[in-house]
Structures are given as structure tokens and as C-alpha cells.
Amino acid sequence: MMHFDDETLMAYADGELDPATSAQVRAAMAGDAAMAGRVARHRAMRDDVHASFAPVLDEAVPQR
């Protein structure tokens, strides 16, 4: 079984990994419920951060 650090799992959750590494992470998650849980937590954290800053993204850009 492959081991992935949190940085790699966060990159996977954000869709930032190359296709080959993404496939390796998916395969590892299929056989490791704990790893799948770690990815789920990273995705939830990403979603929380995006939701927190979404209102700022909708603000008009100041003239200056």
C-alpha cells in the first residue's frame, strides 16, 4: 500500500495532481478507508474556506 503525505492528499482534493498521481491516490483510497477519510476532511476544509471567502469574490472591484 502506498503512503501519501497530507500535502499530496490536499493537492488531490484540490484537483492539482497530475493524472498518474491522481490515479495512484484513488487506488490507495479504495483500499484504505482512513486515507479516504483524510481526503474527505481536506475536501471539507477546502469547501469551508471557499465558502468563507465567496462573498469577497462577489464584491465590486474598487476604482482605485
Image (cartoon, grey):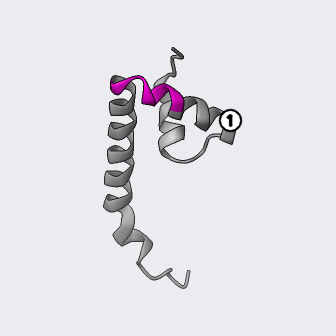
Say which residue appears at 37% left-offset and 67% top-offset: 54
Q: Which residues are magenta?
A: 27-33
Residue 61 in picture, x, y percent from top left: 50, 80
Crowding at dot 1, Cα within 10 Å, few <14 / some 14-19 / many 20+, comes out as few
Q: Position of residue 39 (x, y in %)?
A: 40, 36
Q: Amino acid at mark 1?
A: Ala
Disc 1 element: helix
In the rendered image, the quadrant that contains the C terminus is bottom right
Closer to the camera in the image, 19 or 12 = 19
**What secondary structure is the stretch in magenta mostly built from?**
helix
Where is residue 11 drawn, in percent x and y? 54, 39
Mark 1 lies on residue: 20
Q: Residue at x 60, y 45 (%)?
A: 16
Q: Nearer the viewer, residue 1 or 58?
A: 1
Above or below for 48 versus 56: above
The image shows residue 28 at horizontal and vertical percentages of 49, 25
Residue depicted at 38% across the width and 32% down the height: 36
Find out whether residue 13 is within the magenta segment.
no
Closer to the camera in the image, 3 or 47: 3
Spot the residue most to the top.
1
The residue depicted at 54 percent of the width and 85 percent of the height is 63
- Numbered disc total: 1
